[in-house]
């Protein structure tokens, strides 16, 4: 299981892929997941 920071890095890769192929729904879903993960990191800090 990746840590929150590792998950953020993976979501950022996913975001780049979604943007490069024009997948708007994938981009939206990834941004949502990134926001949730950043909130987790903020709470844990």
Image (tube, grey):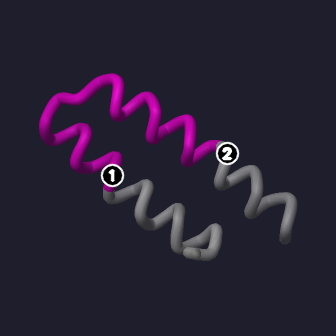
Q: How far apart are marks 1 and 2 (CA)?
A: 15 Å
Q: How many labels does the image show?
A: 2
Residue with the most extreme top position = 24
Dot 2: what SS? helix
- Name the residue located 84 percent from the left edge and 71 percent from the top edge: 45
Tell me: 15 left or right of 33.
left
Magenta stretch secondary structure, dominant? helix
Q: Quick one: quadrant of the N terminus?
A: bottom right
Quadrant of residue 28 in the image? top left
Q: Position of residue 4 (x, y in %)?
A: 64, 68
Q: What stretch is highlighted in magenta?
A: 14-35
Label ID, residue 27: none
Quickly name the residue at label 1.
14
Looking at the image, tell me whether mark 1 or mark 2 is earlier in sequence order: 1
> Is 43 one of the magenta-colored residues?
no
Q: Quadrant of residue 12?
A: bottom left
Residue 32 lies within the magenta run? yes
**In the picture shown, does residue 23 fall above or below 9?**
above
**Residue 36 image label:** 2
- Vertical arrangement, residue 9 with respect to residue 15, above or below: below
Q: Please indicate whether residue 42 sits to the left or right of residue 36 in the image.
A: right
């Amino acid at each position: 299981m990746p840590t929150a920071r590792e998950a953020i890095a993976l979501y950022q890769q996913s975001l780049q892929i979604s943007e490069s192929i024009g997948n708007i729904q994938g981009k939206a879903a990834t941004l949502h997941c990134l926001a949730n993960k950043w909130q987790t990191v903020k709470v844990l800090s």
